[in-house]
Image (cartoon, rainbow, N blue to C red):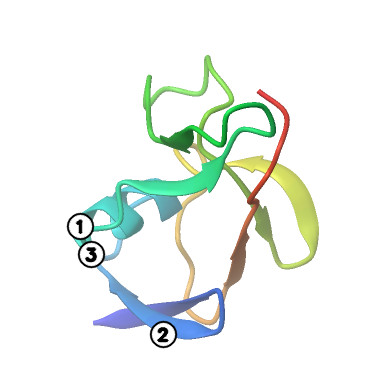
């Protein structure tokens, strides 16, 4: 099984999974909060229409985790306190 690094910790994933699918499979259903109200956000639509699953991937922010295929060694940083 391959791994990505999320917030400094290794996270296994299965080939073909998106970053969001790997996070959910690991039990992490929310990985950012809204600036107003600090409401948790994770996968909502799962098809790239909304922006609830935003993460930074390999230094590039604003990536929709539901659209990006996980790759071995990928570095993912969650985006806490992001705008809704």
Distance Cα–Cα, label 1 vs label 2: 13 Å
| Residue 73, horizontal then vertical, whole percent | 54, 82
Sooner in the amino-acid sequence: mark 1 or mark 2: 2
Q: Where 41 falls versus 76 (above or below)?
A: above
Per the model, the C-alpha gap separating discs 3 and 1 is 4 Å
Q: Residues within 10 Å of mark 1 (few under 14, many from 20)?
A: some
Name which residue lies at 54% across and 17% down.
Answer: 50
Q: Are marks 3 and 1 in contact (CB under 8 Å)?
A: yes
The image's mark for residue 11 is none
Q: Position of residue 76 (x, y in %)?
A: 59, 66
> Nearer the N terminus, badge 2 or badge 3?
2
Q: Is residue 68 left or right of residue 17?
A: right
- Residue corresponding to mark 3: 26
Visible residue check, residue 7: yes
The label on residue 25 is 1
Residue 16: tell me if it is visible.
no
Residue 10 numbered mark, or none:
2
Question: Label 3 crowding class (10 Å Cα cut-off): few <14, some 14-19, many 20+?
Answer: few
Task: In the displayed orientation, state which residue is furthest to the top.
Answer: 49
Q: What's the residue at 63%, 51% (across, down)?
A: 80
SS at mark 1 in the image? helix
In the image, residue 54 above or below residue 23: above
């Amino acid at each position: 099984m391959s791994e990505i690094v999320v917030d400094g910790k290794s996270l296994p994933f299965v080939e073909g999974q998106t970053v969001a699918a790997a996070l959910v499979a690991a039990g992490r259903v929310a990985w950012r909060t809204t600036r107003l109200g600090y409401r948790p956000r994770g996968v909502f639509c799962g098809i790239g229409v909304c922006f609830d699953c935003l993460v930074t991937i390999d230094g590039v922010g604003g990536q929709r985790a539901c659209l990006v295929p996980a790759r071995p060694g990928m570095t993912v940083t969650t985006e806490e306190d992001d705008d809704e």
